[in-house]
Image (cartoon, helix red, strand yellow):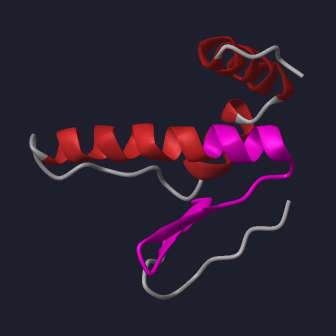
Amino acid sequence: MSLYILEYPLKAPGAKGYRLHDKTVVTGENLQEAVVTAIYLQVNARVLLQAQSLGEPRGLSEDEIPLSRGAQLSALAMERVWEYLCLRAGVDPV
């Protein structure tokens, strides 16, 4: 998998979304991965905002990032989340 880290305006090691001129760019190995990443980028932003109200959130360590990515983007996880999102959107999973 290719991952490009942008230094400006936001450097986010291990992230797959970047803010550029008030736009967010999300990539994936395929359409499913890109869509799931885009949706969870919004979910994670909300969780981060809530966590900040409780104090300084602690991110994943450099060792935890690939483990988390591997679990979240595994074939089984992607199949399940894609089916859930398609059903929620009212379309047949493809």
The single residue placed furthest to the right in the displayed view is: 94
Magenta stretch encompasses residue 26: yes
Q: Is residue 17 above or below residue 41?
A: below
Magenta stretch encompasses residue 22: yes
Q: How many marks?
A: 0
Q: Percent x, y for residue 9?
A: 43, 85
Q: Is residue 75 left or right of residue 17?
A: right
Q: Is residue 24 left or right of residue 32?
A: left
Depth check, front residue: 28 or 73? 28
The part of the chain drawn in magenta is: 12-37
Tell me what residue is drawn at x 57 percent, y 61 percent.
Answer: 17
Q: Quadrant of the C terminus?
A: top right
Q: Can residue 14 be spotted in the picture?
A: no
The single residue placed furthest to the bottom in the displayed view is: 8
Q: Is residue 49 above or below residue 72?
A: below
Q: Can residue 87 be spotted in the picture?
A: yes
Q: Percent x, y for residue 75?
A: 85, 27
Which quadrant of the view contains residue 6?
Answer: bottom right
Tell me what residue is drawn at x 77 percent, y 53 percent.
Answer: 28
Q: Is residue 14 left or right of residue 44?
A: right
Q: Quadrant of the N terminus?
A: bottom right
Q: Is residue 11 above or below residue 32?
A: below
Q: Percent x, y for residue 24?
A: 52, 65
Which quadrant of the view contains residue 76?
Answer: top right
Tell me what residue is drawn at x 79 percent, y 37 percent.
Answer: 32
Q: Is residue 65 above or below residue 25?
A: above
Depth check, front residue: 93 or 61? 93
Q: Percent x, y for residue 54?
A: 10, 40
Tell me what residue is drawn at x 76 percent, y 42 percent.
Answer: 33
Q: Is residue 86 left or right of residue 55?
A: right
